[in-house]
Amino acid sequence: MKCWLISDNADTQMGMRLAGIDGVVVHEHDEAIAAIDKAAARDDIAVIFVTQKVSGLCGPEIAERKLSMRRPLIVAVPDRHGGSHISETLAAYVGEAIGMKL
């Protein structure tokens, strides 16, 4: 199973690619929703990471998908611009979300 990133900027995408996580860059609400739906339809993706800005663009739709879909897990992560809990590592976010230490 893979992780997938939906980001609002190429810098975050590049950093995640260095960690082995592929993804896409989106800038509009409709692009973000389409990217989430496309990633969710893939059988090999277990976790979708969205940057906080993307989460802000389509928060209600993400919340609805979190409640209605059994898989994949959708997790909002801070990007290069910071945000809450920026000192936590990505591994801590994933570990908290899936209940396992990575």
Image: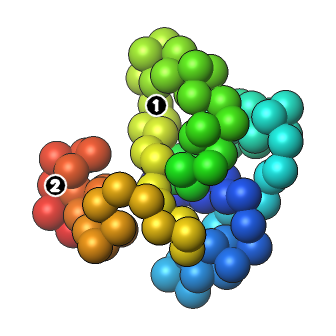
Mark 1: which secondary structure? loop
Q: Amino acid at mark 2?
A: Met
Residue 20 visible in the picture? yes
**Residue at image coords 47%, 39%:** 74
Q: Earlier in the sequence, mark 2 or mark 1?
A: 1
The answer to which of 39 and 52 lies nearer the viewer is 52
The reply, left or right, for residue 82 in relation to residue 102 is right
The answer to which of 2 and 73 lies nearer the viewer is 73
Alpha-carbon neighbours of circle 2 within 10 Å: few (<14), some, or many (≥20)? few
Marking on residue 100: 2
Residue 76 at x, y percent in the picture = 46, 47
Where is mark 1, residue-wise? 71
Residue 50 at x, y percent in the picture = 57, 50
Tally of numbered discs: 2
Q: Amino acid at mark 1?
A: Arg
The reply, left or right, for residue 98 in relation to residue 101 is right
**Residue at image coords 57%, 54%:** 51
Residue 65 visible in the picture? no
